[in-house]
Each structure stands twice: as C-alpha cells, then as structure tokens.
Image: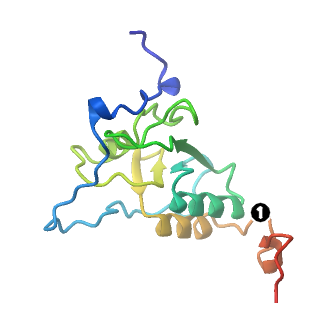
Amino acid sequence: MSKLPRSSRLASPVDTAAHGECRISRRPDDPRPLCRFTGHVVEDPQPGRYHIDAGWCCPWSQRVTITRALAGLEDAVTVSYVDNQRGGRGRAFRERYGPGPVNGFTLLRHAYEATEEGFDGHVSMPALWDRHLARVVRNDFAGIGIDLATRFGRPTASRDTTDFTTFAHPDWTLA
C-alpha cells in the first residue's frame, strides 16, 4: 500500500461488516460530561490558530459554521467537514468533502485521541481544534459559538449587527 501525504489521507468507505454499526455507549455511572472538552478560545487569537471539524449532517455544526460566517471569521478560523455517513469507527474524512487538512486524520476520533490518550468518550461534532496546542479545546456547540462570537475582539466584519433586517431572508416579513 502506498503511503499518502498527511494532507491527502481519506478514510475507507463505511463497512459495517468489518466495523459494525456506530454505537454511542456510555456507562450510567460515568460522572464525566458528554462533551468534556470545555476550553476557550484565547482572547484576540492569531488568524489560523483554530480549526473547526464539522458535519453538514449535524445541526449543531451548522450553527457554529453560521456563527463563523456572521462573525466574518472565514479567513481566521478554518473548517473541514466529515462525511455524512457514520460507520462503526465513527465520523470520517472521505472523498466527498476531502481529507482532514490540519493533521491528516482519517477519523474524527483521531483528533480526540490526540487530545486525550485512550479517549473512551463520545466523539461529537463540531470540535474546535487549537493548532498551537495540537488538541481539541472545545466540543460543545454552544460554547464554540459563543467563543467565535466574542473572543476575536472585532465586530462582525460582513454585516451591520445593529440592524436585524440585514440577517433576514428577503422573503421574510419583519414586524
């Protein structure tokens, strides 16, 4: 098998015969939160420091990527998308959306395992990766959205946030 460059690695197709179905298992007595990475974006971070691993199939990921766009952070915070199909190994970077550009991970689980050795928890998206620390710093969508909206020290670049109508669809009737 030829070795692909880190930036072009892709996961194999979903293979439930080999890997089984994806199951989220959690012991009822596990006191740890489901989303256990709760770090914050540092104040006024350098552009390119943070990366979001998201999924088009995930409404929480969509909220975070919308917040990123409304905050005008497309050039400051990169984003990649995992495949919509989830197999027994969890979410993966496949041909449809391309490889994970930050570390060449083929599975989103690899980012979690790089953060916490022997990670045994739920691999959720979106996940916020800090390139300087080389780890997932946050994996709860509400916290990521708040950080994107407040920690970059600048107002929204692309829209006037004082006028809600700038966010409205042209067909909407606003009272």
Question: Can you say which quadrant of the picture contains the N terminus?
Answer: top left
Characterize the local packing of mark 1: few (<14), some (14-19) or many (20 or more) Cα atoms within 10 angstroms: few
**The residue under label 1 is which amino acid type?**
Ala
- Counting labels gives 1
Is residue 149 toward the left or the right of residue 30 in the image?
Answer: right
- Residue 34, position in %: x, y? 30, 63
Give the secondary structure at mark 1: loop
Residue bearing the label numbered 1: 157
Looking at this rendering, what residue extends furthest in the right direction? Answer: 170
Q: Residue at x 47, y 49 (%)?
A: 130
Can you say whether 52 is above or below 103 in the image? below
131 left or right of 69? left
Q: Where is residue 63? Give x, y as percent.
A: 58, 64
| Image-based side of 29 in relation to 71, left or right | left
Quadrant including the C terminus: bottom right
Q: Identify the residue at the far left of this view.
A: 29
Q: Residue furthest top?
A: 1
Q: Residue at x 64, y 67 (%)?
A: 153
Image quadrant in which you'd find residue 65: bottom right
